[in-house]
Image (cartoon, coloured by chain):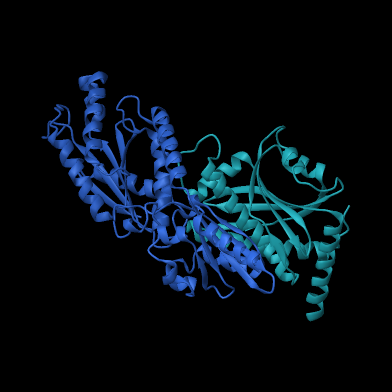
Amino acid sequence: MPDAVHRLSLLESIIGAVNLGAIVLDETGRIVLWNHWMARHSAWSADAVLGRDFFEVFPELQHKRIASAIRQALRDNFQSLLSQTLHKAPFALYTHGAAAIGNEAQERMQQAIAVTPINLPGSPRHCLIQINDVTIAVGREKLLREQTMVLRSQTFSDGLTGIANRRHFDVAIEREMRRAMRNSSPLSLLMIDIDHFKDYNDHYGHQQGDGCLIQVAAELAAMLQRPTDLLARYGGEEFAAILPDTDAAQALQMAEAIRQRAAELRIPHEKTGNDLKHITVSIGVATQHTQHPHQPLDIAALIGAADRALYLAKRSGRNRVTVQTT
Amino acid sequence: MVNLSELENDALVEIFNIGVGHAAAAMSEIVNEEVIMSVPSITFLNRADAAALLGSKKDGERICGVSQHYDGAFATEAILMFPEDKSLEIVRLMVGDSVPLQELTEMEQEAMSEIGNIILNSCVGTLANLFDSELHGSLPLYHVGTSAQIMSSFSGPDDAVVLMLHIDFVLAKHQIHGYVAFVLDLSALHDLKEQVSRYLAKALGQA
Protein backbone atom coordinates (compact mmCIF):
# COMPACT_ATOMS: atom_id res chain seq x y z
CA MET A 1 0.00 0.00 0.00
CA PRO A 2 2.05 2.91 -1.23
CA ASP A 3 -0.49 5.39 0.20
CA ALA A 4 -0.01 4.06 3.70
CA VAL A 5 3.76 4.12 3.33
CA HIS A 6 3.61 7.67 2.06
CA ARG A 7 1.38 8.71 4.95
CA LEU A 8 3.74 7.13 7.44
CA SER A 9 6.82 8.86 6.07
CA LEU A 10 4.89 12.14 5.94
CA LEU A 11 3.93 11.76 9.62
CA GLU A 12 7.52 10.94 10.53
CA SER A 13 8.77 14.04 8.75
CA ILE A 14 6.19 16.16 10.55
CA ILE A 15 7.15 14.78 13.96
CA GLY A 16 10.73 15.59 13.03
CA ALA A 17 9.86 19.13 11.94
CA VAL A 18 7.50 20.30 14.71
CA ASN A 19 8.77 22.95 17.05
CA LEU A 20 8.22 21.06 20.26
CA GLY A 21 9.76 18.10 22.03
CA ALA A 22 8.02 14.76 21.56
CA ILE A 23 8.88 11.60 23.48
CA VAL A 24 6.76 8.47 23.23
CA LEU A 25 6.95 5.68 25.80
CA ASP A 26 5.53 2.20 25.36
CA GLU A 27 3.45 0.46 28.02
CA THR A 28 6.57 -0.60 29.93
CA GLY A 29 8.00 2.93 29.99
CA ARG A 30 10.62 2.40 27.30
CA ILE A 31 11.38 5.24 24.91
CA VAL A 32 10.09 4.41 21.43
CA LEU A 33 10.12 7.88 19.87
CA TRP A 34 12.49 10.80 20.41
CA ASN A 35 12.00 13.53 17.86
CA HIS A 36 14.56 15.74 16.20
CA TRP A 37 13.70 18.69 18.48
CA MET A 38 14.65 16.57 21.53
CA ALA A 39 17.96 15.62 19.93
CA ARG A 40 18.68 19.25 19.06
CA HIS A 41 18.03 20.63 22.54
CA SER A 42 19.40 17.82 24.71
CA ALA A 43 22.60 15.85 25.05
CA TRP A 44 21.01 12.71 23.60
CA SER A 45 20.43 11.66 20.02
CA ALA A 46 17.57 9.31 19.23
CA ASP A 47 20.01 6.41 18.80
CA ALA A 48 21.33 6.92 22.32
CA VAL A 49 17.93 6.66 24.03
CA LEU A 50 15.60 4.56 21.86
CA GLY A 51 14.67 1.28 23.51
CA ARG A 52 15.92 2.42 26.92
CA ASP A 53 13.79 2.83 30.02
CA PHE A 54 12.76 6.48 30.46
CA PHE A 55 13.89 6.58 34.09
CA GLU A 56 17.20 4.97 33.25
CA VAL A 57 17.86 7.95 30.97
CA PHE A 58 16.36 10.45 33.48
CA PRO A 59 16.95 8.94 36.96
CA GLU A 60 16.48 12.37 38.55
CA LEU A 61 12.81 12.42 37.47
CA GLN A 62 11.95 9.12 39.14
CA HIS A 63 9.89 10.41 42.07
CA LYS A 64 8.80 13.67 40.52
CA ARG A 65 5.37 14.62 39.30
CA ILE A 66 6.19 13.55 35.75
CA ALA A 67 6.50 9.96 37.02
CA SER A 68 2.93 10.00 38.32
CA ALA A 69 1.78 11.80 35.15
CA ILE A 70 3.25 8.97 33.04
CA ARG A 71 1.66 6.38 35.33
CA GLN A 72 -1.72 8.12 35.07
CA ALA A 73 -1.47 8.25 31.28
CA LEU A 74 -0.50 4.59 30.89
CA ARG A 75 -2.72 3.15 33.61
CA ASP A 76 -5.71 5.51 33.94
CA ASN A 77 -5.91 7.03 30.45
CA PHE A 78 -5.62 10.54 31.95
CA GLN A 79 -3.77 13.55 30.59
CA SER A 80 -1.55 15.71 32.77
CA LEU A 81 -0.15 19.17 32.55
CA LEU A 82 3.13 20.19 34.20
CA SER A 83 3.36 23.96 34.37
CA GLN A 84 6.60 25.89 34.19
CA THR A 85 5.54 27.90 37.24
CA LEU A 86 5.47 24.86 39.50
CA HIS A 87 8.26 22.80 37.93
CA LYS A 88 10.61 25.25 36.11
CA ALA A 89 12.82 23.02 33.96
CA PRO A 90 12.61 19.29 34.74
CA PHE A 91 14.51 18.16 31.62
CA ALA A 92 18.12 19.12 30.89
CA LEU A 93 17.22 20.99 27.71
CA TYR A 94 18.81 24.13 26.33
CA THR A 95 17.24 26.65 23.99
CA HIS A 96 20.48 27.06 22.10
CA GLY A 97 21.06 23.37 21.77
CA ALA A 98 23.56 20.75 22.74
CA ALA A 99 26.50 23.12 22.23
CA ALA A 100 25.50 24.87 25.44
CA ILE A 101 25.62 21.72 27.55
CA GLY A 102 28.37 21.78 30.11
CA ASN A 103 28.51 25.53 29.85
CA GLU A 104 27.64 26.56 33.40
CA ALA A 105 26.51 30.02 32.38
CA GLN A 106 23.82 28.59 30.13
CA GLU A 107 20.48 28.20 31.87
CA ARG A 108 18.05 25.41 31.17
CA MET A 109 15.15 26.03 28.85
CA GLN A 110 11.94 26.77 30.81
CA GLN A 111 9.43 24.04 30.05
CA ALA A 112 5.68 23.47 29.88
CA ILE A 113 4.94 19.77 29.62
CA ALA A 114 1.86 17.77 28.66
CA VAL A 115 1.63 14.01 29.19
CA THR A 116 -1.02 12.28 27.07
CA PRO A 117 -2.08 8.65 26.67
CA ILE A 118 -1.95 7.32 23.12
CA ASN A 119 -4.42 4.56 22.41
CA LEU A 120 -3.49 2.40 19.43
CA PRO A 121 -5.81 -0.19 18.03
CA GLY A 122 -4.50 -3.67 18.71
CA SER A 123 -1.56 -2.68 20.89
CA PRO A 124 -1.10 -1.64 24.52
CA ARG A 125 -1.45 2.01 25.44
CA HIS A 126 1.49 4.33 24.85
CA CYS A 127 2.21 7.72 26.33
CA LEU A 128 3.26 10.95 24.62
CA ILE A 129 5.31 13.58 26.46
CA GLN A 130 5.20 17.00 24.78
CA ILE A 131 7.61 19.70 25.82
CA ASN A 132 7.19 23.37 24.97
CA ASP A 133 9.91 25.99 25.29
CA VAL A 134 8.35 28.83 27.35
CA THR A 135 11.60 30.64 28.15
CA ILE A 136 10.48 33.81 26.35
CA ALA A 137 7.15 33.97 28.18
CA VAL A 138 8.92 33.45 31.50
CA GLY A 139 11.26 36.32 30.70
CA ARG A 140 8.34 38.57 29.79
CA GLU A 141 6.59 37.89 33.08
CA LYS A 142 9.80 38.42 35.02
CA LEU A 143 10.08 41.85 33.42
CA LEU A 144 6.46 42.60 34.28
CA ARG A 145 7.08 41.65 37.91
CA GLU A 146 10.24 43.71 38.10
CA GLN A 147 8.46 46.77 36.77
CA THR A 148 5.59 46.23 39.19
CA MET A 149 8.14 45.89 41.96
CA VAL A 150 9.73 49.22 41.01
CA LEU A 151 6.33 50.94 41.05
CA ARG A 152 5.42 49.30 44.30
CA SER A 153 8.77 50.03 45.93
CA GLN A 154 7.55 53.57 46.39
CA THR A 155 5.02 52.26 48.88
CA PHE A 156 7.55 49.81 50.27
CA SER A 157 10.28 52.21 51.25
CA ASP A 158 10.69 54.28 54.37
CA GLY A 159 10.02 57.94 53.68
CA LEU A 160 12.90 59.21 55.79
CA THR A 161 15.79 56.84 55.19
CA GLY A 162 14.85 55.40 51.78
CA ILE A 163 15.51 51.82 52.94
CA ALA A 164 12.75 49.20 53.14
CA ASN A 165 9.88 50.05 55.46
CA ARG A 166 8.08 47.86 57.97
CA ARG A 167 5.57 46.69 55.38
CA HIS A 168 8.35 45.59 53.07
CA PHE A 169 9.96 43.78 55.99
CA ASP A 170 6.75 41.88 56.78
CA VAL A 171 6.44 40.68 53.17
CA ALA A 172 10.14 39.84 52.87
CA ILE A 173 10.38 37.87 56.13
CA GLU A 174 7.43 35.73 55.12
CA ARG A 175 8.89 35.08 51.67
CA GLU A 176 12.35 34.25 53.01
CA MET A 177 10.94 32.03 55.74
CA ARG A 178 9.11 29.97 53.14
CA ARG A 179 12.11 29.85 50.88
CA ALA A 180 14.33 28.75 53.78
CA MET A 181 11.91 26.01 54.67
CA ARG A 182 11.64 24.71 51.12
CA ASN A 183 15.37 24.70 50.59
CA SER A 184 16.10 23.56 54.15
CA SER A 185 18.50 26.47 54.46
CA PRO A 186 19.19 28.62 57.53
CA LEU A 187 17.69 32.09 57.91
CA SER A 188 19.10 34.76 60.21
CA LEU A 189 17.59 37.96 61.50
CA LEU A 190 19.42 40.91 63.08
CA MET A 191 17.61 43.50 65.20
CA ILE A 192 19.71 46.65 65.33
CA ASP A 193 19.02 49.57 67.66
CA ILE A 194 20.87 52.88 67.93
CA ASP A 195 22.08 53.31 71.53
CA HIS A 196 20.85 56.28 73.59
CA PHE A 197 18.97 57.67 70.60
CA LYS A 198 16.35 59.44 72.71
CA ASP A 199 19.12 61.33 74.46
CA TYR A 200 20.60 62.19 71.04
CA ASN A 201 17.26 63.64 69.87
CA ASP A 202 16.78 65.54 73.12
CA HIS A 203 20.26 67.04 72.92
CA TYR A 204 20.72 67.69 69.19
CA GLY A 205 17.09 68.15 68.10
CA HIS A 206 14.92 66.06 65.83
CA GLN A 207 16.37 67.36 62.57
CA GLN A 208 19.83 66.18 63.47
CA GLY A 209 18.25 62.98 64.84
CA ASP A 210 16.77 62.38 61.40
CA GLY A 211 20.16 63.06 59.79
CA CYS A 212 21.73 60.49 62.11
CA LEU A 213 19.10 57.88 61.14
CA ILE A 214 19.64 58.56 57.42
CA GLN A 215 23.41 58.24 57.71
CA VAL A 216 23.33 55.06 59.79
CA ALA A 217 20.70 53.46 57.52
CA ALA A 218 22.73 54.22 54.38
CA GLU A 219 25.95 52.83 55.86
CA LEU A 220 24.34 49.64 57.11
CA ALA A 221 22.40 49.07 53.87
CA ALA A 222 25.66 49.36 51.93
CA MET A 223 27.12 46.51 53.99
CA LEU A 224 24.45 44.04 52.88
CA GLN A 225 25.78 43.00 49.50
CA ARG A 226 23.68 40.04 48.45
CA PRO A 227 20.48 40.78 46.54
CA THR A 228 18.33 38.74 48.94
CA ASP A 229 19.66 40.49 52.06
CA LEU A 230 17.32 43.20 53.28
CA LEU A 231 17.77 46.06 55.71
CA ALA A 232 14.49 47.59 56.87
CA ARG A 233 13.53 50.33 59.27
CA TYR A 234 11.59 48.35 61.85
CA GLY A 235 10.52 51.17 64.14
CA GLY A 236 11.83 54.57 65.35
CA GLU A 237 15.58 53.97 65.70
CA GLU A 238 15.36 50.22 65.23
CA PHE A 239 16.47 48.41 62.07
CA ALA A 240 16.09 44.79 61.03
CA ALA A 241 18.34 42.86 58.66
CA ILE A 242 17.04 39.68 57.00
CA LEU A 243 19.91 37.40 56.01
CA PRO A 244 18.82 34.34 53.98
CA ASP A 245 21.15 31.33 53.66
CA THR A 246 23.10 32.58 56.64
CA ASP A 247 23.87 30.34 59.61
CA ALA A 248 24.36 31.51 63.20
CA ALA A 249 28.15 31.89 62.92
CA GLN A 250 27.94 33.91 59.69
CA ALA A 251 25.16 36.05 61.14
CA LEU A 252 27.23 36.80 64.24
CA GLN A 253 30.16 37.79 62.02
CA MET A 254 27.92 40.08 60.00
CA ALA A 255 26.42 41.63 63.13
CA GLU A 256 29.85 42.29 64.57
CA ALA A 257 30.97 43.96 61.33
CA ILE A 258 27.84 46.15 61.39
CA ARG A 259 28.42 47.11 65.03
CA GLN A 260 32.02 48.12 64.24
CA ARG A 261 31.05 50.01 61.12
CA ALA A 262 28.45 52.04 63.06
CA ALA A 263 31.03 52.94 65.69
CA GLU A 264 33.59 53.89 63.03
CA LEU A 265 31.23 56.52 61.68
CA ARG A 266 32.17 58.50 64.81
CA ILE A 267 28.90 60.43 64.79
CA PRO A 268 29.37 62.64 67.86
CA HIS A 269 27.03 61.96 70.79
CA GLU A 270 27.76 63.94 73.97
CA LYS A 271 24.97 62.43 76.06
CA THR A 272 25.75 58.72 76.01
CA GLY A 273 26.32 58.78 79.75
CA ASN A 274 29.59 56.87 79.33
CA ASP A 275 33.09 57.30 77.89
CA LEU A 276 32.16 56.66 74.29
CA LYS A 277 31.13 60.04 72.92
CA HIS A 278 29.80 58.80 69.60
CA ILE A 279 26.89 56.82 68.16
CA THR A 280 26.95 53.05 68.67
CA VAL A 281 24.46 50.26 67.99
CA SER A 282 23.31 47.16 69.86
CA ILE A 283 22.41 44.08 67.86
CA GLY A 284 20.35 40.98 68.64
CA VAL A 285 20.95 37.95 66.41
CA ALA A 286 18.62 34.99 65.87
CA THR A 287 18.93 32.13 63.43
CA GLN A 288 16.46 29.50 62.40
CA HIS A 289 17.54 26.30 60.79
CA THR A 290 14.70 24.20 59.49
CA GLN A 291 15.51 20.55 59.93
CA HIS A 292 12.08 19.27 59.02
CA PRO A 293 10.73 20.25 55.63
CA HIS A 294 7.15 20.25 56.88
CA GLN A 295 7.81 22.22 60.05
CA PRO A 296 5.33 25.10 60.15
CA LEU A 297 6.48 28.67 59.64
CA ASP A 298 7.18 30.54 62.82
CA ILE A 299 8.02 34.10 61.97
CA ALA A 300 6.96 35.35 65.41
CA ALA A 301 9.43 33.02 67.13
CA LEU A 302 12.34 34.24 65.01
CA ILE A 303 11.50 37.91 65.56
CA GLY A 304 10.91 37.24 69.26
CA ALA A 305 14.32 35.59 69.62
CA ALA A 306 16.08 38.48 67.87
CA ASP A 307 14.17 40.94 70.10
CA ARG A 308 15.19 39.11 73.26
CA ALA A 309 18.81 39.06 72.08
CA LEU A 310 18.64 42.81 71.45
CA TYR A 311 17.19 43.37 74.90
CA LEU A 312 20.05 41.38 76.44
CA ALA A 313 22.60 43.37 74.42
CA LYS A 314 21.05 46.60 75.72
CA ARG A 315 20.91 45.40 79.31
CA SER A 316 24.48 44.16 79.37
CA GLY A 317 25.94 47.54 78.42
CA ARG A 318 25.03 48.34 74.76
CA ASN A 319 27.42 48.61 71.78
CA ARG A 320 27.48 44.84 71.55
CA VAL A 321 26.08 41.80 69.75
CA THR A 322 24.08 39.09 71.50
CA VAL A 323 22.91 35.81 70.00
CA GLN A 324 19.76 33.81 70.70
CA THR A 325 19.03 30.48 69.14
CA THR A 326 15.45 29.50 68.40
CA MET B 1 -33.81 15.59 43.04
CA VAL B 2 -31.36 12.72 43.33
CA ASN B 3 -32.18 9.86 45.61
CA LEU B 4 -28.98 8.65 47.11
CA SER B 5 -29.21 6.62 50.28
CA GLU B 6 -27.21 7.83 53.25
CA LEU B 7 -24.84 4.93 52.72
CA GLU B 8 -24.32 5.81 49.05
CA ASN B 9 -23.78 9.45 49.95
CA ASP B 10 -21.22 8.51 52.60
CA ALA B 11 -19.45 6.19 50.18
CA LEU B 12 -19.07 8.97 47.60
CA VAL B 13 -17.81 11.43 50.24
CA GLU B 14 -15.28 8.86 51.37
CA ILE B 15 -14.13 8.10 47.83
CA PHE B 16 -13.65 11.81 47.08
CA ASN B 17 -11.74 12.27 50.32
CA ILE B 18 -9.35 9.52 49.26
CA GLY B 19 -9.04 11.30 45.90
CA VAL B 20 -8.24 14.75 47.27
CA GLY B 21 -5.90 13.08 49.77
CA HIS B 22 -3.83 11.82 46.82
CA ALA B 23 -4.01 15.28 45.25
CA ALA B 24 -2.82 16.92 48.48
CA ALA B 25 0.11 14.51 48.69
CA ALA B 26 1.09 15.29 45.08
CA MET B 27 0.88 19.03 45.69
CA SER B 28 2.78 18.75 48.95
CA GLU B 29 5.54 16.95 47.03
CA ILE B 30 5.77 19.87 44.57
CA VAL B 31 5.99 22.64 47.18
CA ASN B 32 7.74 20.64 49.93
CA GLU B 33 5.20 21.93 52.41
CA GLU B 34 2.20 20.36 54.02
CA VAL B 35 -0.96 20.60 51.94
CA ILE B 36 -4.20 19.32 53.43
CA MET B 37 -7.37 18.81 51.43
CA SER B 38 -10.70 17.38 52.40
CA VAL B 39 -14.24 17.06 51.09
CA PRO B 40 -16.60 17.75 54.00
CA SER B 41 -19.78 17.24 51.99
CA ILE B 42 -21.37 16.74 48.59
CA THR B 43 -24.69 17.98 47.18
CA PHE B 44 -26.68 17.39 44.04
CA LEU B 45 -28.05 20.55 42.44
CA ASN B 46 -29.41 21.72 39.15
CA ARG B 47 -27.23 23.99 37.08
CA ALA B 48 -28.89 27.28 38.10
CA ASP B 49 -28.71 26.42 41.81
CA ALA B 50 -25.07 25.41 41.40
CA ALA B 51 -24.27 28.79 39.85
CA ALA B 52 -26.21 30.54 42.62
CA LEU B 53 -24.34 28.63 45.32
CA LEU B 54 -21.00 29.75 43.90
CA GLY B 55 -22.03 33.32 43.28
CA SER B 56 -24.01 33.80 46.46
CA LYS B 57 -21.48 35.91 48.32
CA LYS B 58 -21.24 38.87 46.01
CA ASP B 59 -23.13 39.54 42.84
CA GLY B 60 -20.92 39.43 39.81
CA GLU B 61 -17.96 38.10 41.75
CA ARG B 62 -15.49 36.49 39.40
CA ILE B 63 -14.70 32.81 39.72
CA CYS B 64 -11.68 30.95 38.37
CA GLY B 65 -12.42 27.53 37.02
CA VAL B 66 -10.37 24.66 35.67
CA SER B 67 -12.33 22.10 33.69
CA GLN B 68 -11.63 18.68 32.26
CA HIS B 69 -13.85 16.43 30.24
CA TYR B 70 -14.05 12.74 31.07
CA ASP B 71 -15.79 9.97 29.21
CA GLY B 72 -15.93 6.20 29.46
CA ALA B 73 -17.80 4.43 32.25
CA PHE B 74 -19.74 7.69 32.57
CA ALA B 75 -19.33 11.06 30.90
CA THR B 76 -18.87 14.26 32.84
CA GLU B 77 -17.45 17.71 32.75
CA ALA B 78 -15.48 18.26 35.96
CA ILE B 79 -14.78 21.82 37.07
CA LEU B 80 -12.67 22.99 39.98
CA MET B 81 -13.76 26.45 41.09
CA PHE B 82 -12.46 29.07 43.47
CA PRO B 83 -13.37 32.74 43.86
CA GLU B 84 -10.82 34.71 41.81
CA ASP B 85 -9.02 36.18 44.83
CA LYS B 86 -8.70 32.71 46.36
CA SER B 87 -7.17 31.35 43.16
CA LEU B 88 -4.60 34.12 43.31
CA GLU B 89 -3.92 33.14 46.90
CA ILE B 90 -3.53 29.43 46.10
CA VAL B 91 -1.20 29.94 43.17
CA ARG B 92 0.94 32.41 45.07
CA LEU B 93 1.13 30.16 48.09
CA MET B 94 2.15 27.30 45.82
CA VAL B 95 4.69 29.38 43.92
CA GLY B 96 5.94 31.31 46.94
CA ASP B 97 6.12 34.49 44.92
CA SER B 98 5.54 37.78 46.64
CA VAL B 99 4.92 40.17 43.78
CA PRO B 100 1.17 39.83 43.46
CA LEU B 101 -0.29 41.32 40.32
CA GLN B 102 -3.95 42.19 39.88
CA GLU B 103 -4.84 39.02 38.02
CA LEU B 104 -3.25 35.67 37.43
CA THR B 105 -0.61 36.04 34.72
CA GLU B 106 -0.54 33.61 31.83
CA MET B 107 2.04 31.43 33.54
CA GLU B 108 0.09 31.50 36.80
CA GLN B 109 -3.06 30.50 34.95
CA GLU B 110 -1.15 27.52 33.69
CA ALA B 111 -0.08 26.69 37.25
CA MET B 112 -3.72 26.96 38.34
CA SER B 113 -4.63 24.63 35.47
CA GLU B 114 -2.08 22.14 36.73
CA ILE B 115 -3.49 22.35 40.27
CA GLY B 116 -6.93 21.63 38.80
CA ASN B 117 -5.46 18.82 36.72
CA ILE B 118 -3.98 17.19 39.83
CA ILE B 119 -7.16 17.53 41.90
CA LEU B 120 -9.60 16.46 39.18
CA ASN B 121 -7.50 13.50 37.99
CA SER B 122 -7.10 12.33 41.60
CA CYS B 123 -10.84 12.55 42.29
CA VAL B 124 -11.94 10.91 39.07
CA GLY B 125 -9.06 8.43 39.17
CA THR B 126 -10.03 7.20 42.63
CA LEU B 127 -13.63 6.95 41.55
CA ALA B 128 -12.77 5.00 38.39
CA ASN B 129 -10.37 2.79 40.27
CA LEU B 130 -12.86 1.81 42.95
CA PHE B 131 -15.56 1.28 40.35
CA ASP B 132 -13.10 -0.89 38.48
CA SER B 133 -13.78 1.04 35.31
CA GLU B 134 -11.92 3.36 32.99
CA LEU B 135 -12.43 6.95 31.93
CA HIS B 136 -10.56 9.01 29.41
CA GLY B 137 -9.53 12.45 30.61
CA SER B 138 -8.76 15.63 28.65
CA LEU B 139 -6.19 18.30 29.39
CA PRO B 140 -7.37 21.10 31.71
CA LEU B 141 -8.93 24.32 30.43
CA TYR B 142 -8.78 27.57 32.41
CA HIS B 143 -11.88 29.78 32.75
CA VAL B 144 -12.61 33.06 34.45
CA GLY B 145 -16.00 34.72 34.77
CA THR B 146 -19.09 34.81 36.93
CA SER B 147 -20.32 31.47 38.24
CA ALA B 148 -23.31 31.62 35.87
CA GLN B 149 -21.02 32.22 32.88
CA ILE B 150 -18.78 29.33 33.82
CA MET B 151 -21.60 26.93 34.60
CA SER B 152 -23.36 27.72 31.34
CA SER B 153 -20.23 27.31 29.21
CA PHE B 154 -20.51 23.53 29.35
CA SER B 155 -22.72 21.88 26.85
CA GLY B 156 -25.34 19.48 28.05
CA PRO B 157 -29.09 19.40 28.51
CA ASP B 158 -30.83 21.90 30.76
CA ASP B 159 -31.88 19.12 33.08
CA ALA B 160 -28.24 18.22 33.73
CA VAL B 161 -27.45 17.59 37.36
CA VAL B 162 -24.44 19.00 39.13
CA LEU B 163 -22.69 16.90 41.74
CA MET B 164 -21.02 19.56 43.88
CA LEU B 165 -18.09 18.78 46.17
CA HIS B 166 -17.13 21.27 48.85
CA ILE B 167 -13.37 21.32 49.13
CA ASP B 168 -11.28 22.60 52.02
CA PHE B 169 -7.72 23.40 51.12
CA VAL B 170 -5.08 24.25 53.74
CA LEU B 171 -1.60 25.45 52.85
CA ALA B 172 0.80 27.41 55.06
CA LYS B 173 -1.89 28.21 57.66
CA HIS B 174 -4.22 29.57 54.98
CA GLN B 175 -7.57 27.88 54.68
CA ILE B 176 -9.36 28.18 51.38
CA HIS B 177 -12.78 26.89 50.39
CA GLY B 178 -13.55 25.82 46.86
CA TYR B 179 -15.78 23.54 44.86
CA VAL B 180 -15.56 20.76 42.36
CA ALA B 181 -18.61 20.40 40.14
CA PHE B 182 -19.35 17.33 38.06
CA VAL B 183 -21.90 18.13 35.37
CA LEU B 184 -23.81 14.93 34.66
CA ASP B 185 -26.63 14.34 32.24
CA LEU B 186 -29.35 11.93 33.34
CA SER B 187 -27.75 8.89 31.77
CA ALA B 188 -24.38 9.72 33.31
CA LEU B 189 -26.10 10.24 36.65
CA HIS B 190 -27.77 6.87 36.24
CA ASP B 191 -24.40 5.26 35.41
CA LEU B 192 -22.80 6.89 38.43
CA LYS B 193 -25.54 5.70 40.78
CA GLU B 194 -25.29 2.22 39.39
CA GLN B 195 -21.52 2.23 39.90
CA VAL B 196 -21.97 3.40 43.50
CA SER B 197 -24.46 0.67 44.32
CA ARG B 198 -22.31 -1.98 42.63
CA TYR B 199 -19.32 -0.77 44.62
CA LEU B 200 -21.31 -0.84 47.85
CA ALA B 201 -22.72 -4.29 47.15
CA LYS B 202 -19.19 -5.55 46.55
CA ALA B 203 -17.74 -3.78 49.60
CA LEU B 204 -20.53 -4.97 51.90
CA GLY B 205 -20.49 -8.45 50.40
CA GLN B 206 -16.82 -8.79 51.19
CA ALA B 207 -17.23 -7.46 54.72
Residue shown at 48% from the left, 69% from the top: A62
Q: Is residue A219 above or below residue A81?
A: above
Q: Which chain is blue?
A: A
Residue shown at 37% from the left, 55% from the top: A97
Q: Picture coordinates of residue A194 (x, y %)? A: 24, 34
Quadrant, the C terminus of chain A: bottom left
Q: Is residue B96 above or below residue A32?
A: above
Q: Picture coordinates of residue A285 (x, y %)? A: 28, 48
Quick check: B115 left or right of A276? Answer: right
**Chain B colour in the picture:** cyan
Q: Is residue A72 visible?
A: no
Q: State the residue in front, B190 or B22.
A: B190
Q: Picture coordinates of residue A200 (x, y %)? A: 22, 26
Residue shown at 22% from the left, 26% from the top: A212
Residue shown at 14% from the left, 26% from the top: A270
Q: State the residue in front, A177 or A203.
A: A177
Quick check: A192 left or right of B97? Answer: left
Quadrant, the N terminus of chain A: bottom right
Q: State the residue in front, A75 or A49.
A: A49
Q: State the residue in front, A136 or A207.
A: A136
The residue lying furthest to the front in this view is A2
Q: Is residue A231 visible?
A: yes
Asked where in the image residue B152 lies, by quadrant, the reply is: top right
Quick check: B73 left or right of A149? Answer: right
Q: Picture coordinates of residue A193 (x, y %)? A: 27, 37
